Image (tube, grey):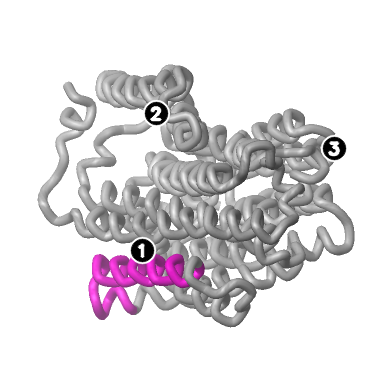
Amino acid sequence: MSMSGESLADQGHPDRWRTLTVSCLGVFLLVVALTALNVALPDIAGDFDAEIGDLQWIVDSYAIVFAGLLLAGGALGDRIGRRTALLVGFAIFGAGNAFGATADSVEVMIAARVVAGLGAAVMMPATLSSISEVFSNHDRGRAIAAWSGLAGAGGAFGPAIGGWLLAVSGWQAVFLLNAAFAVLGLVGARLWVPVLPGQRTGHFDLVGTVLSVAAVGCLVYVAIEGPSEPFAPTTIAALIGAVVSIKVFFVHEGRTTDPLLPLSLFDDRDRIAGAGTLVIAAIGFNGVLFVAALLLQISWQETALATGLLLVPIGMIEVVAANSCVPLRERFGLENVITAGLILMAIGYLGMALVPQGNRPLFIAAGLIAGMGNGFAIPLSVDRIVGDVEPAFAGVAASVNDMAIELGASLGVGLLGGLQHVVFERQLDEGQSRLISQVASDESRSAFRTASNAGLFFAAGAMIVGIAVARSTNSGSVDPATIAGT
């Protein structure tokens, strides 16, 4: 079934709502895969005698591949079509999670997460670019809000689902559930997503792909290892590698005839502000989920199920807020609603840090405030990036959005987790075990609470910085040559 570009812009594709359903399932799956794993980390640490650094790599090995290959995944979708990209992505993601369920060491689990990250990098841009392509200009904003809301639902129910699975089975069940969701996505994409042929031609930018992966990998390595070993040769080398890779990437993209990332997308400062806001918001949201899941189970001694239920309200209120952000934007203005969201996130994270030990109602209240802020800030920032882009580059624009989120997520886990790691170890006496599974005394639990609070305070500060980024618009266009430094 095909439609002209004019009628599609006016009415949308007849299968747009089914496409939205599959796209929302995809993003829900990816968020559940992350948040459900967070509550399983203490059990994994116990089985593999893992430290906080090991857990960070289990989380971020996925994020590095995911974020690093997102631009390539989006460009691939622009060439092979959205449905094919969804099918390939769901299949690889499912295989990676099935592999993860068999892991018997940290190294094997990291390898499985790398495979899952590859599938996610192909699938995720296709979920958002499909929406951008099949919905009319009139309905696209609400569809994107629904997409963002389902991402919030994944954040809401992921910890609870993970906690329940741990209560009745084990951490392996978390991976098997993700694999089962991927199979469901495969069927849905095959039956419901229309065949929308790729609209980009030309050579695939392998050089840009390698440079983007190198840049993201180096940045995340610095975020994870930097707090504990800031002057180590490997940390310094990774920092230099990140700077050089980013610089060379933009120079290359500005000169090649078939760029992975057309720099013309950055002519609009709104798109730049949206991407920057997403990075910062994701640093806070994903870093806080990592830190809070460990805080509740290690310091508060909550079960995995109770931890999941305590984190559920964050995502649930995010769904509600995401669905109300469009009318609020029309009444108060986009920048003002995003700013309010970032302020609420900062207040919520501070509240989570200051809640007295074991006070569940206050912790839930703080989570509700943070989740509401996330629901205001994220969908509108997403719409800034993908809301008005030509179909041939919808996949790449979606990749910019997804890369901003995943880069922020990996940096958030690295920075907040690294800060948690460093502060915790500095409070321990010489000879005390650093293993998460051996935190047993009141003294060590108190030390872990202090370390977790440091991460939450950092997240709150980052949201304040995000306000300046979100409001850095309406000052003209950006010359792509300036970005490339040419």
Instruction: Please name the residue that numbered disc 2 is placed on.
Output: 260
Q: Mark 3: which amino acid?
A: Thr
Residue for point 51% across, 52% down: 287
Instruction: Please indicate whether residue 332 sits to the left or right of residue 400 in the image.
Output: left
Q: Earlier in the sequence, mark 1 or mark 2?
A: 2
Q: State which mark lies toward you, 1 or 2.
A: 1
Local crowd at mark 2 within 10 Å, few (<14), some, or many (≥20)?
A: many
Quarter of the figure with the C terminus = top left
Name the spot of residue 452 as percent of width and height, x first.
Answer: 54, 56
Q: Which residue is mark 3?
A: 102
Task: Return the residue found at the far right.
Answer: 169
In the image shown, does 363 or 393 lie closer to the viewer?
363
Q: Which residue is mark 1?
A: 380
Can residue 82 be seen in the rendering of this structure? no
Q: Which of marks 1 and 3 precedes in the sequence? A: 3
Spatial separation of the CA atoms under disc 3 and disc 1: 40 Å
Q: Is residue 161 left or right of residue 173?
A: left
Secondary structure under the numbered disc 1 in the rendered image? helix
**Left or right, 37 with reference to 421:** right
Q: Amino acid at mark 2?
A: Leu
Magenta segment: 328-352
